[in-house]
Amino acid sequence: MNMQSINLAEKLSTFGELWSPRIVAGFNGHDVMVVKVNGEFNWHSHPDTDDLFLVLSGRLTIQMRDGDVVLGPGEMYVVPKGVEHCPRADEETHLVIIEPAGDTQYRRPRNRRDQNQDLTKDQAMLLIHCPYCQEERPELEFRNTGEAHIERPKDIAGISDEEFEKFFFIRANPKGVTYERWRHIHGCARFFNAVRDTVSDRFVTTYKAGEPRAEVERGDDGVLTVKGAAQ
């Protein structure tokens, strides 16, 4: 039995990456992790588990469709399973989070939550390829601006209320392939389109605004690729 206490401040001092949790302990099949955050995560939900946030320093806003919860040091909140939420920090904030151990649903490859037991090993946050800059950049440089390839009505003044509602407010929220419009807000500032797998959070491809819609297919191994792309 390990009789040594865990110093969370010391663990946090071993890394500088944002949105990249580190495991500090395990209990009852769960990982206890510390994480540094700044900026905004993506809107998401966990269908099978609650989501716990405990603030050590800074301030965290948990955005939900029905309202926000703001946490300061020493405060915590549990988002019930199935509730869509989006954590946001307007300053560097340090958290404790708890998630099921080894559950791949919460360990997305090349994502903020891709973990390793070794706290001294560097972990990269999600990288997004900008088709204009022609390089991969950290996700904090980008902003998701909604669904891509939305066709504007030719006579917007003459459409019905139902058509108006559909154009302005109704968006697809698929499990799997989704087409999104992104902006490299802290880079070239240009808009582009992306194909993303919402299950794995993996970006399949990105392409410039105005280019044809990219067609993708899922292989026998379950991996999405662009149709006709060289393997």
Image (tube, rainbow, N blue to C red):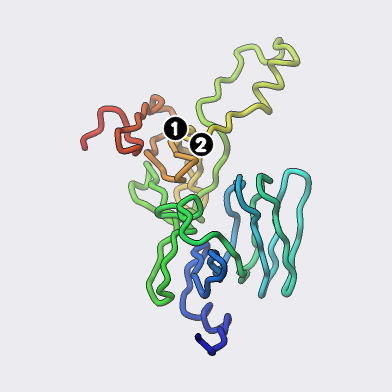
Q: Earlier in the sequence, mark 1 or mark 2?
A: 2
Q: In the image, what residue type sits under mark 1?
A: Ala
Would you say the residues marked 1 and 2 are in contact, meaning their CB atoms lie under 8 Å apart? Answer: yes
In the rendered image of this protein, does residue 86 appear above or below residue 162?
below
Circle 2 packing at 10 Å, graded few (<14), some (14-19), many (20+), is: many
* Left or right: where 1 falls relative to 43: left
Residue shown at the point (70%, 51%) measured from the top left? 80
Q: Quadrant of the C terminus?
A: top left
Circle 1 Cα neighbour tier, 10 Å, few/some/many (<14 / 14–19 / ≥20): some
Name, please, the residue furthest toward the bottom: 3
Q: Residue at x 56, y 83 (%)?
A: 6
Q: Which is more toward the observer, 96 or 60? A: 96
Front one among 56 and 24: 24
Up the image or down, 52 lies above or below 229; here it is: below
Amino acid at the residue labelled 2: Arg
Give above or below for 66 relative to 60. Answer: above
Q: Residue at x 60, y 48 (%)?
A: 48
Badge 2 is on which residue? 181
Count of numbered circles in the view = 2
Viewer-nearest residue: 218 or 4: 4
Return the mark for residue 209.
1
Relative to 102, 224 lies left or right: left
